Amino acid sequence: MSYLQYEGLVSAAFLSPVIPAPLEPQLCTLVEQAPVGDDWLHEIKYDGWRLLARKQGSDVRLYTRGGVEWSQRLPRLVEAVRGLAVDSAWLDGEIVRLDDDRFPDFEQLQRDMRARAERNLFCQVFDLPWLHGEDLTRWPLLDRKTRLRETISNSEQRIRFTDHLVGNGADVFARADALDLGGIVSKRIEGTYLPGVRSRDWQKAKCWRTLTVVVGGVAFDKDGHFEGLLAGTPTDGGLRYEGLVEFGLSRLGDLRQLCFELATTEQQFIGEWKPSDRRFWLRPEVGIEIRALPRRPGRFLRHATALVALPR
């Protein structure tokens, strides 16, 4: 290595301090009601996938919550992060798919990710744990968000600042609920960033919807593991497929006995339902009350949880 090459490496090291890799994201605690008080700020809970972006000079890496690298899957977002006027940073946010009305659409997000279609994918950034090689995790949240807004103010539109409201948590939640959003995330204004910790300083309250569905079958994944109950609503000619009920199934009693009693070879669903060889059909004789997140028109159930089985 020549002296000039060595000098260049040393200069680069000073200009672009090394930041940690990987960085585990701080996690939220699920609550039924948003906290009150002016020591809390509240953000929209976007329906997407958690994503962290690491920039070290021109090197940009994108990571999921579990530490899987997604840089190859989102090249446009990589270029947008590379274009930020910072030498090094960690950005914490969520990859979302926004429709024409700027509402998040999780089902279309899944399709776009499979198709490698990035045009309507955005990163809603809400925290800045590191900047210019400096550890900001001990900074109060509101100060970190102020720096974040400044940092991405001139960024490409694919990177979006997640705004917030201070105080009035119940009112903010009511507005999100009226708009059929997924919920809100509430955070202590003075809170530090706690990598890898599920903290009560970050709380999420979801906008649940309660509805009644009929069980028409059981679903299994490609490895033969149980996925959930196939649920529909009665219409002329059969059941209109609504989606999977995956949670709270212990409230329904003995599912094996239920499957034994109601097993049939006849497919129960109509419309856009696409059967596969990983389905086990049941006669549509059992109704259940469930709760699920709000959904865009024509979309399937999200986070559907069984509450109670209705009398047969």
Image (tube, rainbow, N blue to C red):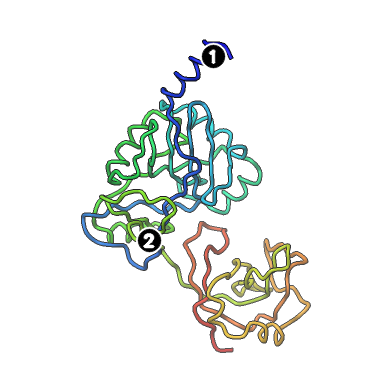
Q: Residues within 10 Å of mark 1 (few under 14, many from 20)?
A: few
Give the amino acid type for the residue marked by disc 1 in the picture: Gln
Q: Which residue is disc 1 drawn over?
A: 5
Residue at 52% across / 65% down in the picture? 303
In the rendered structure, the answer to whether residue 168 lies left or right of residue 6 reads: left
Q: Position of residue 63 (x, y in %)?
A: 53, 44
Residue at 31% across / 49% down in the picture? 192
Residue 171's image quarter? bottom left
Q: Which residue is disc 2 drawn over?
A: 177
**Regarding mark 1 in the picture, which secondary structure is present there?**
helix
Q: CA distance from mark 1 to mark 2?
A: 58 Å
Above or below, comparing residue 265 to residue 103 in the picture: below
Q: Position of residue 169 (x, y in %)?
A: 28, 59
**Regarding mark 2 in the picture, which secondary structure is present there?**
helix
Q: Position of residue 151 (x, y in %)?
A: 36, 32
Q: Residues within 10 Å of mark 2 (few under 14, many from 20)?
A: some
In the rendered structure, the answer to whether residue 270 lies left or right of residue 140 reads: right
Disc number placed over residue 306 in the picture, else none: none
Earlier in the chain: of badge 1 and badge 2, it is: 1
Numbered circles on residues, count: 2
In the rendered structure, the answer to whether residue 166 lies left or right of residue 222 reads: left
Confirm whether residue 98 shows in the render: no
In this view, the mark in front (1 or 2): 1
Q: Position of residue 243 (x, y in %)?
A: 60, 66
Above or below, comparing residue 56 to residue 92 in the picture: above
Residue 253's image quarter? bottom right
Q: Quadrant of the N terminus?
A: top right
Give the amino acid type for the residue marked by disc 2 in the picture: Asp
Q: Quadrant of the C terminus?
A: bottom right
Residue at 45% across / 32% down in the picture? 18
